[in-house]
Amino acid sequence: MLGFIFIGLVVGVLARVIAPGRHQLGLLMTLAVGLVGSIIGGVVASSIGTGEIGDMDLLGGIVAVASGAVLVALVSAGNSRRSVSS
C-alpha cells in the first residue's frame, strides 16, 4: 500500500513538471492525480500484455506520467475557472 502511495506521489510530481503552466494543486491533489495516473498506466500496460496492473514497468510508467500530466492540466484548468468565476 505504501508503495502505491509513493509511486503515485512520484507520478504526480513528474506530471506537474511535464504539464505546462502554473498549477494550484496541493500535495493531496498531486497524490490523487498521481494515483489515478498510475492506475491508468497499469490498466493500459496490462491490456497491452506487458504485465499485471500492480506491476510498474517502463511502458506503464510512461503512460502513468503522461495520463497524470493530462489530469494535472484538466484539474488545473477546472481550478482556475472556479477561482475566476467566484
Image (cartoon, rainbow, N blue to C red):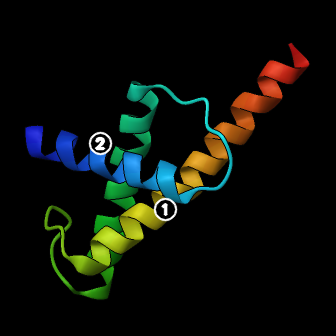
Quick one: which residue is furthest to the right in this view? 85
Q: Residues within 10 Å of mark 2 (few under 14, many from 20)?
A: many
Q: Is residue 19 left or right of residue 34?
A: right
Judged by depth in the image, the label closer to the viewer, 1 or 2, is: 2
**Would you say residue 44 is visible in this rendering?**
yes
Within the image, what quadrant is residue 78 found in? top right
Q: Which residue does the numbered mark 1 point to in the structure image?
A: 67
**Would you say residue 1 is visible in this rendering?**
no
Q: Quadrant of the C terminus?
A: top right
x and y, in percent, of residue 46 in the image: 25, 76
Q: Residue at x 37, y 63 (%)?
A: 64
x and y, in percent, of residue 3 in the image: 10, 46
Q: Which residue does the numbered mark 2 point to in the structure image?
A: 9
Q: Residue at x 61, y 37 (%)?
A: 23
The type of residue carrying mark 2 is: Leu
Q: Do tag 1 and tag 2 residues touch (Cβ < 8 Å)?
A: no
Within the image, what quadrant is residue 76 found in? top right
Q: Nearer the viewer, residue 78 or 19?
A: 19
x and y, in percent, of residue 31 in the image: 36, 36
Quick one: which residue is furthest to the top in this view? 86
x and y, in percent, of residue 4 in the image: 17, 46
Within the image, what quadrant is residue 83 found in? top right
Q: Residues within 10 Å of mark 1 (few under 14, many from 20)?
A: many
Q: Nearer the viewer, residue 36 or 7?
A: 7
Report the Cα–Cα distance between label 1 and label 2: 14 Å
Q: Residue at x 76, y 30 (%)?
A: 80
